[in-house]
Amino acid sequence: MNLRKKYDIPNNAVITIAGTVGVGKSTMTNALAQALDFRTSFEKVDTNPYLDKFYADFERWSFHLQIYFLAERFKEQKRIFEYGGGFIQDRSIYEDTGIFARMHYEKGTMSEVDYETYTSLFDAMVMTPYFPHPDLLIYLEGSLDDILDRIKERGRPMEQQTPIEYWEEMHHRYENWINQFNACPVLRLNINDYDLVNNEKCVEQIVERVGHFIKKTRELTKI
C-alpha cells in the first residue's frame, strides 16, 4: 500500500530533516523519500569553493562560507517549491544562522560586522512571509552518549579525530536552537525509538506520525 495515501500526506509536502552530526539525517531522508515516493534534496559539498579555504583559515573565510551556504540553500528551497514540492530535504537553511554562524561569531572567528551583515541578509531572504518554509521540520534527537556511539560506529576518519568537546558543544547548540525554533512546525523523533538500518518496516511508524502531525498542524492553521 502507498504509505503517503494511507496516512493522508499531501503529495506536495516539503519535509526537512535536522539534527547534529551522527543522528542519521541522510538515512531518514532516503527512507522517508522511498516510503512516500518523494524526491530527495541533499547538501552539495563537492562543488563548494570555500570549504578547503575555510578549514585552512576560519577567521578569513567563515563569512564567505556562510554566505555561500545561504545562497545555495535559498536557491535549492526555491527550486523545490517551483517543482511543486514532494521532497525530503537533508538539513535545513535555518541551522546555518541559528547554529554555525552564531558559533563563529561567539568564538571570534567571524567579526561582529560580518555576523550582523549575514544575519540581516538571512532575515531579509528567509524570515519573511514570501519565503517557502517547509510543511514540517523533523528534528532527530538523542543523548550525547548515543550520538557519540553512532559517530564512532560509522568510523569516518575526520570525525574520529575530532575532539569530544566539539561534539558536546554541537549537541548543546542544537538543543538550544531547536528549543527556540518557530519558523515552521517541528516534529521531534528520538533516535532510540526506531532503527531504519536494521528494520525497514519501522519507517511506517514514522510516516504515521508525520501524517497525523501534518494533519493536526493544518487543522490548527484553519482555526
Image (cartoon, helix red, strand yellow):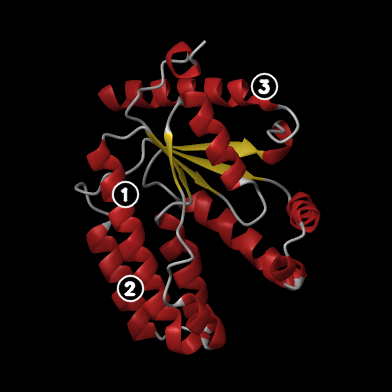
Residue 223 appears in the figure: no
- The crowd level at tag 1 (other Cα within 10 Å; few <14, some 14-19, many 20+) is many
User: Whole-percent x and y of residue 184?
Assistant: 38, 42
Name the secondary structure under disc 1.
helix
Q: Residue sitting at 45 percent across and 19 percent down?
A: 4
Q: In this picture, is 102 found above or below 79?
A: below
Q: Quadrant of residue 38?
A: top left
Q: Quadrant of residue 66?
A: bottom left
Q: Quadrant of residue 8?
A: top left
Say which residue label 2 marks.
Answer: 118
Q: Residue sitting at 76 percent across and 73 percent down?
A: 161
User: Whole-percent x and y of residue 205?
Assistant: 61, 21
Q: Are marks 2 and 3 in contact (CB under 8 Å)?
A: no
Say which residue label 1 marks.
Answer: 77
Name the secondary structure under disc 3.
helix
Three-letter residue code for mark 2: Tyr
Q: Residue sitting at 26 percent across and 23 percent down?
A: 222
With 86 as the anchor, is 88 left or right in this view?
right
Three-letter residue code for mark 3: Lys
Three-letter residue code for mark 1: Gln
Say which residue label 3 marks.
Answer: 201
Name the N-terminal-most of marks 3 and 1.
1
Residue at the far front in the pictured view: 46
Q: Are marks 3 and 1 in contact (CB under 8 Å)?
A: no
Name the secondary structure under disc 2.
helix
Residue 53 appears in the figure: yes
